[in-house]
Amino acid sequence: MNPFDDENLSFRVLTNSGGQFSLWPGTLDVPAGWNVRHGPAARAECLESIAANWTDMRPRAAAGPAAP
């Protein structure tokens, strides 16, 4: 089974410098350039965290300047 789909594993929510989020199995090392934002927690909880916090899927550089 693909570890990204295993509901029984613990997961983390990662973010990179571009403001992008990733669901990451807790059994795998965090890749270079990514930081843990949430977890370890259940897969569903991590997906909820991503949905609540990542509202613009574009990388920060593509999103343009922040609104005043």
Image: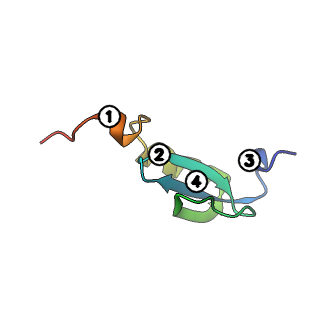
Q: Which residue is mark 2?
A: 20
Name which residue type carries label 4: Cys
Residue that appears at 82% across and 45% down:
2
How busy is the neighbourhood of tag 2: few (under 14 within 10 Å), some, or many (20 plus)? some
Label 4, label 1: how many angstroms apart (C-alpha)? 24 Å
Q: Which residue is mark 4?
A: 46
Residue that appears at 53% across and 57% down:
33
How busy is the neighbourhood of tag 3: few (under 14 within 10 Å), some, or many (20 plus)? few
| Residue 4, disc | 3
Label 4, label 3: how many angstroms apart (C-alpha)? 12 Å
Q: In what element is the residue under mark 3? A: helix
Position in image of residue 31 (x %, y %): 63, 58
Which is closer to the viewer, label 4 or label 3?
3
Which is closer to the viewer, label 3 or label 2?
2
35 relative to 10 in the view: left or right: left
Which is closer to the viewer, label 4 or label 2?
2
Way the structure is coloured: rainbow
Q: In what element is the residue under mark 4? A: helix
Position in image of residue 56 (x %, y %): 39, 36
**First-in-chain label (4 vs 2):** 2
Which is closer to the viewer, label 4 or label 1?
1
Name which residue type carries label 3: Phe
Quarter of the picture holding the C terminus:
top left
- Whether the residues at callouts 4 and 2 have beta carbons within 8 Å, the answer is no
Label 1, label 3: how many angstroms apart (C-alpha)? 28 Å
**First-in-chain label (4 vs 1):** 4
Label 3, label 2: how many angstroms apart (C-alpha)? 17 Å
**First-in-chain label (3 vs 2):** 3
Above or below for 2 versus 31: above
